[in-house]
């Protein structure tokens, strides 16, 4: 048992959280003989025999999985949410494991962008884990997504089930984006499952002295596609799905009355410079806010990592 699985087990056994209520929503079971069964999961190693679903089976389409460390850094959480928003904004389903940290941020990012997201659980759909994410799981269902498991409805999660779950996350995805991953880790195992299923692996580089980025950096050194900015991610999405976000000057939102926007219009800055200037006090909140302004066509992220006025906004002026 690796360190991550032992931690999963410890959390499961030591948790004193109240048992969450059962998820409300459409419930169904799909066997591999059902024509609605996801084709992408028929061809993976050890394909599931049955999927239990709360939500809609139409959400089970090939998308991009975004995974990362449970004990994520603000950098990792911000990146997971930011890139999930980008993917969801162009209609790509975001798939993850519903865990704390990067997984949760990826789901929330997709939801914030009004997109579709799918959460694969280690145990049954009536044994929500982690319990504190019950509201997130319900929001996924209510927003047209799905919470899915190959386990029976009431089967409690066990340590070995998470590695089994990871093959489903990777299998339903055309590519897996690893945001943060230690060595060894459950996140790193999802990349292994993606490669075993013949899927692409993308990774976000991090500090060489950060344990939570050791796995991501190792993947890049082994040939994973590095995601270094929005442009590289959108290029990857275009390669995988044939979809790209295009700025349209006619659809650019009005310039908000916001000191942060005013400062960036006058002097483009990187996120760390924005925080150093006292214009924001939360790395996660800042990345969320920047992504909203970027999606609204007010800001763009430049190749050097700075944020400033978008070309569409300048054209509108």
Image (cartoon, rainbow, N blue to C red):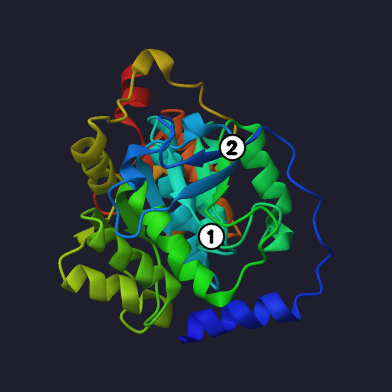
Query: In this orientation, which residue lies closer to the viewer: 4 or 49?
Result: 49
Name above or below for residue 149 compared with residue 77.
Answer: above
Residue name at image x 55 percent, y 85 percent: 6
Q: Give the quadrant of residue 98.
A: bottom right
Left or right of 64? Residue 197 is left
Query: Can residue 262 be seen by looking at this rendering?
Result: no
Q: Residue furthest right?
A: 18
| Mark in front: 2 vs 1 | 1
Query: Which residue bears the numbered disc 2?
Result: 258
Query: In this orientation, which residue lies closer to the viewer: 31 or 85?
Result: 31
Query: In this orientation, which residue lies closer to the viewer: 39 or 14?
Result: 39
Residue name at image x 39 percent, y 72 percent: 181
Query: Which residue bears the numbered disc 1?
Result: 283
Query: Can residue 255 be seen by looking at this rendering?
Result: yes
Residue name at image x 74 percent, y 81 percent: 14
Per the image, label 2 sits on a secondary structure element best described as loop
């Amino acid at each position: 048992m690796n360190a991550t699985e032992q931690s999963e087990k410890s959390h499961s056994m030591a948790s004193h959280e109240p048992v969450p209520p059962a998820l409300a929503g459409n419930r169904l079971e799909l066997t591999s003989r059902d024509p609605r069964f996801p084709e992408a999961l028929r061809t993976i190693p050890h394909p599931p025999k049955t999927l239990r679903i709360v939500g809609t089976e139409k959400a089970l389409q090939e998308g991009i999985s975004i995974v990362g460390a449970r004990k994520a850094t603000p950098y990792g959480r911000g990146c997971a949410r930011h890139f999930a928003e980008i993917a969801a904004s162009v209609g790509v389903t975001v798939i993850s494991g519903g865990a704390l940290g990067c997984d949760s941020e990826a789901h929330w990012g997709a939801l914030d962008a009004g997109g579709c997201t799918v959460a694969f659980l280690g145990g049954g759909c009536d044994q929500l884990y982690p319990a504190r994410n019950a509201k997130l799981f319900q929001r996924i269902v209510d927003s047209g997504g799905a919470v899915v498991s190959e386990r029976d409805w009431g089967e409690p999660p066990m340590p070995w089930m998470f590695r089994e779950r990871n093959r489903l996350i990777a299998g339903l995805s055309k590519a897996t984006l690893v945001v943060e991953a230690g060595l060894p880790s459950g996140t790193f195992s999802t990349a292994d499952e993606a490669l075993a299923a013949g899927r692409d692996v993308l990774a976000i580089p991090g500090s060489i002295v950060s344990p939570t980025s050791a796995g991501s950096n190792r993947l890049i050194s082994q040939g994973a596609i590095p995601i270094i900015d929005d442009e590289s991610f959108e290029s990857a999405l275009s390669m995988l799905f044939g979809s790209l976000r295009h700025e349209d000057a006619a659809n650019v939102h009005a310039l908000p009355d916001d000191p942060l926007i005013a400062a960036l219009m006058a002097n483009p800055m990187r996120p760390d410079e924005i925080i150093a200037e006292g214009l924001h006090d939360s790395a996660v909140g800042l990345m969320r806010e920047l992504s909203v302004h970027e999606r609204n066509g007010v800001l763009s992220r430049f190749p050097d990592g700075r944020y400033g006025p978008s070309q569409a906004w300048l054209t509108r002026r």
